[in-house]
Amino acid sequence: MKKIMIAIVLSGLLHANDDKPVGYVYVDSVMYSATKTGTTQNFNPKGMKWAFGYLLGDYTIPVVDVDISTGLEFDFISSTNVHTKSNVISSSTGINLGEVTARIDNVYGLYLKTPISVAGKFDFNTYLGMSFSSLTLKNQNFTISDNQTTSLSYGFGLEYMLPKNISAHISYMQYFTNLSSIDIGLGVKF
């Protein structure tokens, strides 16, 4: 993961220009929170996110002099780490399922992104769109659940612009009722 982030930063240094960038690529480390899994346990698998976006336009709210942009973003998240817990109890039957492993297979998302410029180098980002995600719970003997969901997703985040169109950012995303994440990463704008 660190090598990929370094490659993005170096790429940004080579391709940076002084014009206002409209496209971007991000790579993030994703920490999921899966709740209400049909068991008495919550799980926290990890993933890696690639985000590709294009800003469609800029607008200024004249009364408060705030710059707002709109854009489209496509996200792809792959699983990098499963989360395993011992002595997991089924919430519906009360049966001990033993050791259970949670894995987010893949997440795909398409969002309308609205960055709002705050204090120069900071952007407050909002996301609204659709995502497809898959959460699988397994023990040694069988698959407990394989929840594939397409749903309305939303989120918000904070981004800080570094020199040469490199950005550092953190965001919170809610994919469906029981799956959310905190994403932290770097990106390059071009």
Image (spheres, rainbow, N blue to C red):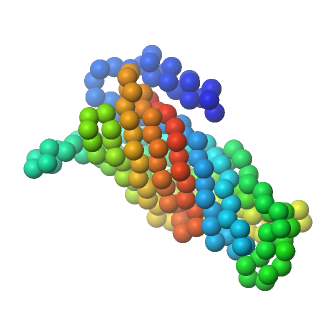
Q: For the N terminus, which image quadrant?
A: top right
How far across and how far down the image is residue 109, in percent?
A: 50, 53
Q: Which residue is drawn at 78% across and 57% down?
A: 84
Q: In this view, does 9 lie above or below 38?
A: above
Q: In this view, does 146 lie to the left or right of 116?
A: right
Q: In which quarter of the image is residue 103?
A: bottom right
Q: In this view, does 8 lie to the left or right of 125?
A: right
Name the residue at the right extreme. Answer: 141
Q: Residue at x 89, y 66 (%)?
A: 141
Q: How many numbered tags mark residues here?
A: 0
Between residues 153 and 54, which one lies in front from this camera angle?
153
Q: In this view, does 80 lie to the left or right of 178?
A: right
Q: In which quarter of the image is residue 179?
A: bottom right
How far across and how far down the image is residue 170, in percent?
A: 47, 44
Q: Is residue 183 above or below residue 168?
A: below
Between residues 154 and 121, which one lies in front from this camera angle?
121
Name the residue at the top extreme. Answer: 14
Q: Residue at x 26, y 34 (%)?
A: 120
Residue 165 visible within the image: yes
Residue 77 visible within the image: no
How far across and how far down the image is residue 4, in percent?
A: 60, 29
Q: For the C terminus, which image quadrant?
A: top left
Name the residue at the bottom extreme. Answer: 93
How far across and how far down the image is residue 124, in percent?
A: 34, 46
Between residues 95 and 11, which one lies in front from this camera angle?
95
